[in-house]
Image (cartoon, rainbow, N blue to C red):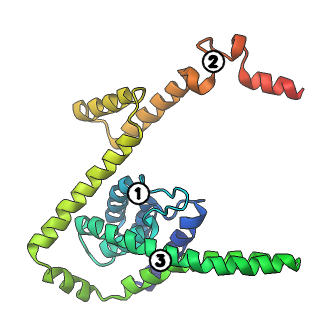
């Protein structure tokens, strides 16, 4: 393996671990992590396809209160390494990502538990007025979150390609076929989760418009995306529930809400 590729993938994995907590640049999202791994390893197409399929699943993963969702970061990075560096087919990579997501959930729970003690260190430093002592525990906790993904990624990279191929060849054909079929089902479930999130009477017409355009025309995905964005902007601009116009083309009494706010400041 190319040492530069190993370093780049390790860095991507570390950033994905950080972003699993920070949610700033979204490096932990499959479409980003897998695509970057594809770029770093020279397999952009495979990485982008894997990331796009896994992203449909991860759209439904979110932390709600104390309930922690499956870990998209470890699933994305490890599956990306298997597909882009080890030659595993995309269907098997999709199926393995589910088990990896559960493993990542256990790892992040462990790191969060350890971080509780680190927070107490910050509390003790705060009582003494030690600003530096408050800052360092935060960096330590973030570093642990980054290494939570980077170390498993390094271990996966260190497994020889021959060992991975031998292990895959040792798997019975009905198991690999099942994994491929399961990977296809996973994508369908991802679509269903996204549709379920938008299943309101006001949004169904847009779904059918997009479905009809996809079936009856040769518009590319980029074209469909541009049409979708344009329709969304038109809907937001015309819908009273978003701009509070009451159908009068402005705010209450035909006054633009932004003008009213600016006039109040004046």
Residue 204's disc number: none
> Image point 31% across, 29% down: which residue?
208
Q: How many marks?
A: 3
Residue 245's disc number: 2
Q: Quadrant of residue 171?
A: bottom left
Within 10 Å of the Cα at label 3, are there few (<14), some (14-19), or many (20+) other Cα atoms?
A: some
SS assignment at label 2? loop
Q: Is residue 136 left or right of residue 152?
A: right
SS assignment at label 3? helix
16 or 98, nearer to the observer: 98
The mark lying in front, picked from 1 and 3, is 3
Mark 3–mark 2 contact, CB under 8 Å?
no
Q: Is residue 218 left or right of residue 139?
A: left
139 w.r.t. 240: above or below = below
Residue 9 visible within the image: yes
For marks 3 and 2 on the same chain, the one whose residue lies earlier in the sequence = 3
The mark lying in front, picked from 3 and 2, is 3
**Residue 263 image point, x, y percent:** 84, 23
Q: CA distance from mark 2 to mark 1?
A: 36 Å
Residue receiving disc 1: 58
**Residue 25 image point, x, y percent:** 57, 60
**Residue 151 image point, x, y percent:** 47, 83
Q: CA distance from mark 3 to mark 2?
A: 49 Å
In which quadrant of the rendered image does the C terminus lie? top right
**Residue 42 image point, x, y percent:** 37, 71
Residue receiving disc 3: 107
């Amino acid at each position: 393996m190319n040492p530069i590729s190993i370093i780049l993938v390790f860095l991507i994995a570390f950033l994905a671990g950080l972003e699993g907590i920070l949610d700033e640049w979204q490096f932990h999202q499959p479409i980003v992590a897998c695509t970057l791994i594809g770029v770093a390893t020279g397999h952009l197409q495979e990485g982008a396809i894997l990331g796009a399929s896994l992203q449909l699943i991860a759209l439904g993963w979110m932390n709600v209160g104390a309930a922690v969702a499956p870990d998209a970061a470890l699933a994305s990075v490890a599956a990306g390494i298997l597909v882009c560096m080890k030659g595993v087919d995309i269907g098997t990579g999709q199926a393995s990502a589910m088990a990896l997501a559960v493993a990542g959930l256990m790892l992040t729970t462990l790191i969060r538990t350890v971080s509780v003690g680190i927070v107490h260190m910050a509390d003790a430093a705060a009582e003494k007025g030690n600003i530096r002592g408050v800052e360092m525990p935060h960096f330590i906790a973030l570093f642990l979150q980054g290494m939570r993904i980077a170390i498993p990624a390094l271990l996966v990279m260190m497994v020889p390609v021959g060992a991975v191929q031998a292990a895959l060849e040792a798997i019975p054909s009905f198991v690999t076929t099942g994994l491929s079929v399961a990977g296809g089902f996973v994508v369908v479930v991802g679509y269903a989760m996204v549709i379920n999130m938008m299943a309101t009477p006001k949004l169904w017409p847009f779904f059918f418009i997009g479905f009809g355009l996809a079936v009856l025309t040769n518009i590319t995905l980029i074209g469909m995306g541009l049409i979708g964005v344009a329709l969304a902007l038109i809907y937001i601009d015309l819908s009273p529930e978003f701009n509070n116009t009451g159908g009068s083309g402005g705010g209450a009494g035909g006054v633009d809400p932004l003008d009213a706010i600016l006039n109040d400041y004046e």
